[in-house]
Each structure stands twice: as structure tokens, then as C-alpha cells.
Image: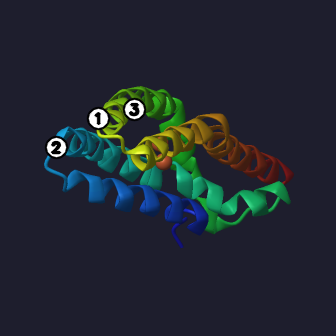
């Protein structure tokens, strides 16, 4: 069994993607800015959904000290995060936020308050990942390795 991104997080990405996609259809500065963000977000979200966030699916079990063979892919996640992926995610966010601010600027000129709010929410999503989700994924993966080691020692 492969680990999957928790549904709540999948839903949040889906919502951001859908709203962003609608903006990319506009034939103005806002649309151009949205297309630039979409290009960045597409790859970034895939990175998160395939290589980071699946670790969080088993956080409740890990919190209870439970491990299972189905959690094996946490080994890869731990190695990836340690091997530079963690820093890469933060770097992605810096680029993304710069591009998102261009949407805000264009939206302000057009008097589109809803879109300014959308950008604020998007940036908050990135902040939440940096403050909670990324560290939680890292802790989950590392804790899994630790529990595995303990188990092996107990034989
Ligand atoms: Fe995300
Ligand atoms: Fe992100």
C-alpha cells in the first residue's frame, strides 16, 4: 500500500488550483500573472503531493507509536527531505510568493478585492506548510526511522 496525501490537504490544493485556473483564462495582466503562478504551482504541488505530504497520512498512527510495513515509503521521504528537498520547498515558496504578489498588484489596479484575498489565502497556505506541514512530515518520517531502529534492536 502506498501512502496517500490526507484528503483535507488534497482538497485544499484542489481548491487553490481551481481558483487559480479560472484566473489564467483572463486576457489581462491578472491573467498573465496567474499563468506565471500556475506554471510554478503545478510542479511545486506535484512535488509536495508525491514526495512530502503522504508522510502525514500516518501521523495519527505514528503518534500512537504504531508502525507497519505499509509505511516503508517514509524511508524515501526522510532521505529526500534530508537530501535537499526540504530547502527546495522553501525556495519554491519564495519564488511562488513573488509571482503571487504580481496577481495582487494586477488585482488591485482592477479593483478586484476578491482576487487580492485569494492571494492572501494562497500565501497563508504556503506559510502554514512552512510552519507546520513540512516540519510535521519531516518529524513523521524521522520518527518512523527511529521506531524501526528500536524495533530492530528489540529483535
Ligand atoms: Fe501546498
Ligand atoms: Fe507549498
Image-based side of 26 in relation to 124, left or right: left
Residue that sits furthest to the left in the current view: 27
* Viewer-side label of 2, 3: 2
Q: Which color mode does the image show?
A: rainbow
Q: Are marks 2 and 1 in contact (CB under 8 Å)?
A: yes
Q: Does the residue labelled 3 lie within 8 Å of ligand 2?
A: yes
* Residue position for label 1: 106
Image-based side of 36 in relation to 138, left or right: left
Of callouts 2 and 3, the N-terminal one: 2
- Tell me which residue sits at (45%, 62%) in the image: 15
Q: Residue 128's image quarter?
A: top right
Residue 131: image location, x then y, percent: 65, 35
Q: Residue 107's image quarter?
A: top left
Mark 2–mark 1 Cα distance, whole angstroms, equals: 9 Å
Image-based side of 116 in relation to 55, left or right: left
- Tell me which residue sits at (48%, 29%) in the image: 90
SS under mark 3: helix
SS under mark 2: loop
Residue 73 shows up from this direction: no
Residue 143: image location, x then y, percent: 73, 45
In the depicted view, which residue is nearer to us: 26 or 84? Answer: 26
- Tell me which residue sits at (28%, 59%) in the image: 22
| Image disc number at residue 92 | 3
Around disc 2, counting alpha carbons within 10 Å, would you say few (fewer than 14), some (14 to 19), or many (20 or more)?
few
* Residue position for label 2: 28
Amino acid at each position: 500500500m502506498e501512502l496517500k496525501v490526507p484528503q483535507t490537504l488534497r482538497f485544499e490544493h484542489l481548491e487553490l488550483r481551481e481558483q487559480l485556473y479560472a484566473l489564467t483564462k483572463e486576457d489581462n495582466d491578472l491573467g498573465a500573472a496567474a499563468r506565471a503562478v500556475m506554471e510554478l504551482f503545478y510542479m511545486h504541488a506535484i512535488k509536495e503531493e508525491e514526495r512530502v505530504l503522504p508522510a502525514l497520512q500516518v501521523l495519527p498512527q505514528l503518534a500512537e507509536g504504531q508502525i507497519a510495513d505499509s509505511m516503508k515509503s517514509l524511508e524515501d521521504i526522510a532521505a529526500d527531505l534530508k537530501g535537499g528537498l526540504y530547502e527546495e520547498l522553501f525556495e519554491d515558496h519564495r519564488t511562488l510568493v513573488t509571482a503571487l504578489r504580481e496577481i495582487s498588484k494586477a488585482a488591485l489596479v482592477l479593483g478586484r478585492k476578491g482576487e487580492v484575498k485569494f492571494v492572501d489565502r494562497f500565501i497563508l497556505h504556503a506559510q502554514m506548510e512552512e510552519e507546520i506541514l513540512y516540519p510535521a512530515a519531516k518529524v513523521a518520517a524521522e520518527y518512523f526511522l527511529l521506531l524501526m531502529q528500536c524495533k530492530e534492536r528489540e529483535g
